[in-house]
Amino acid sequence: MATVKPLPPPAKYGGRHTVTLIPGDGIGPELLNHVRELFRFSCVPVDFEVVNVCSSTEDDINNAITAIRRNGVALKGNIETLHTLPASHKSRNNLLRTSLDLYANVMHCKSLPGVQTRHNNIDIMIIRENTEGEYSSLEHESVTGVVECLKIITRTNSLRIAEYAFKLAREKGRKRVTAVHKANIMKLGDGLFLQCCREVAAGYPDIAFDAMIVDNTTMQLVSKPQQFDVMVMPNLYGNVVSNVCAGLVGGPGLVPGANYGHDYAVFETATRNTGKSIADRNIANPTAMLLASCMMLDHLKLYDYATMIRNAVLTTMNETRVRLNSPRRCSPHTFHN
Amino acid sequence: MAALALFKVFGSGGMQTVTLIPGDGIGPEISTAVMKIFEAAKAPIQWEEKNVTAIKGPGGKWIIPPEAKESMDKNKIGLKGPLKTPIAAGHPSMNLLLRKTFDLYANVRPCMSIEGYKTPYTDVDLVTIRENTEGEYSGIEHTIVDGVVQSIKLITEDASRKIAEYAFEYAKNNQRASVTAVHKANIMRMSDGLFLRKCRQVAENYRDIKFTEMYLDTVCLNMVQDPTQFDVLVMPNLYGDILSDLCAGLIGGLGVTPSGNIGANNVAIFESVHGTAPDIAGLDLANPTALLLSAVMMLRHMGMHDYSKKIETACFNTIRDKKVLTGDLGGKSKCSEFTAEICQRVRDMD
């Protein structure tokens, strides 16, 4: 993926890359085991440095962050955030994203041929600002019973994410970028975001730019999702829109996601589910995580391996018609290629 | 509890007076359509038409005209068409002004699939209840330094408790089986955490209604895959805004979605949430379904279940039969023809 300045070379010794692997909670460990098995089977020159993050102490997450700094690239499962814990205990996933400044969350929602959904021909790229907005984790109780939560929007980060979106759109030959906002209500915050998008759009005359209010966007997505091309938005709306789009193309088990920063890249499933209710039952769909690992291989410039695995996954989905939510087990699917 | 008073059953004997705010654009014609249909159904409703265009009050603040306020305070029930928000008029959004004047703290949107109006989603039958006064829409924003803006999301114990109580009362009075609180407490621990705590506390008093909690993203993900799993959803302002429009999209859009706003002191204003459609205003092409269904919601709120069922059935049957439909529903009929068809069906039911 192209970024503003060239990335430092990834950790590569003797022709083999080292990638940090964070199993996380719920279905994370089993999905990542599938990735490892597949990589081993396919002789992919990647070694995984496994870092377990347990929710209680800060040390684990700091170790994980150091490991990612060292290796430059990571593949992760979602780390559960028990919201019964006090506010001082920050979401580990969020901490990871902000510490490594992984400012762009990229998700490509494309209708897959073997998957039955209500809408067809969906091809949307969602670029979500990943570090600020409503996820700033700044809250306080000024008076008992009154809580304030701060949503921060900055010019720098808005310009940065807009620039990323347009650059990516141009690279991928996309025609239009839509900014999603609620500037009619949050005039200063989302107003600033929108303004930054407009400024960046002016520098890309070959790409059309428009804006849509978030509630209208969700309504349009469930009625006519084919109208969208590339979408860029602040953090929370990104959360909503990416989940809606993942649902439209077939569910959380199918869509991979990537988090990019200037220096680091972390790959995971797009909707970041922990999947506690289906963990350890061999029924979780590994597609999203496998496709995420292909995105990671592309990032490491191991294009041939990426294409091979991606084709194998998509062919399996199409030919054997492994139905989503079917009682088939997860592992035979992985070894079909 | 204050919430219980909201569901006071209106006497079935005499006429009830309702404040009618026709609104702008297609507002007047769809309001006329609704009045005709109510007349055909012989519903005991008397309409008091009022205009709510903002005027400058004594202190220099924008207020709604005093006669309109008096009328609403007296009648307690209102039906409102779409209001335009002019950009250069100087006054704030009329909807916002109404909300503040009557402390309309709960926005209720029942979303039910309309047989005959096909969408990719079938068997949708859920209700979104949105806290309408605080949250992300508090309008409190500051520029801290040049290029850094802070928007404040406010969650208070009182407002959270009130909306939770309303949600459970609504569920109880409308025979709904479960209430789901939608939140993002993993990220916004204190604010959504407070909201969630209040919902849990209120749930304790309604043991026969199932209470669940779900993250906003999970709701969105599941909603577009299988909306039938949801029943009543309660949530803070922003999530409510997004989800209620998402759900409206599932059943066919704002042109067929009813909406009600419940306020303090038993005031309730039911409204259509679509725009004023200035391009078709006055051409007898508008679809009155949204306003009609909102009026039906109003009848239910007032305890007039027979009339509400009659009018609703007539409306749904007309749409299902597809013989007389307005342009947006895929037909070629005029608003008056559509209205007449519904009126005829209503009369036939007697």
Image (cartoon, helix red, strand yellow):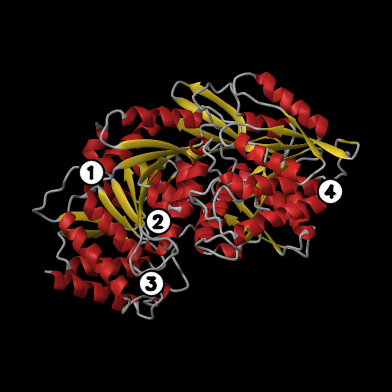
B64 and A58: which is toward the camera: A58
Label 2, label 4: how far apart the Cα atoms are: 63 Å
Q: Residues within 10 Å of mark 2 (few under 14, many from 20)?
A: some
Q: Do discs 1 and 3 share a chain?
A: yes
Label 4, label 1: how far apart the Cα atoms are: 61 Å
**Which mark is nearer the camera, 4 or 3?**
4
Q: Is residue A178 visible?
A: no
Q: Which mark is residue B5?
A: none
Q: Report which residue position mark 2 lands on.
A: B53
Q: Which mark is residue A301?
A: 4
**Which mark is nearer the camera, 2 or 4?**
4
Q: Report which residue position mark 3 lands on.
A: B286
First along the sequence among labels 1 and 3: 1
Horizontally, residue B5 falls left or right of residue B167, namely: left
**Which mark is nearer the camera, 2 or 1?**
1
Label 4, label 3: how far apart the Cα atoms are: 57 Å
Q: Do discs 4 and 1 share a chain?
A: no
Horizontally, residue B163 falls left or right of residue A71, namely: left
Q: Report which residue position mark 1 lands on.
A: B173
Locate residue A38, reporting x and y percent. 71, 44
Q: Secondary structure at mark 4?
A: loop
Chain bearing mark 1: B
Chain bearing mark 4: A
Q: Is residue B29 visible?
A: yes
Q: Secondary structure at mark 2?
A: loop
Q: Image height check: is B230 above or below B27?
A: above
Query: As shown in the figure, which amino acid type bears the numbered disc 3?
Result: Ala
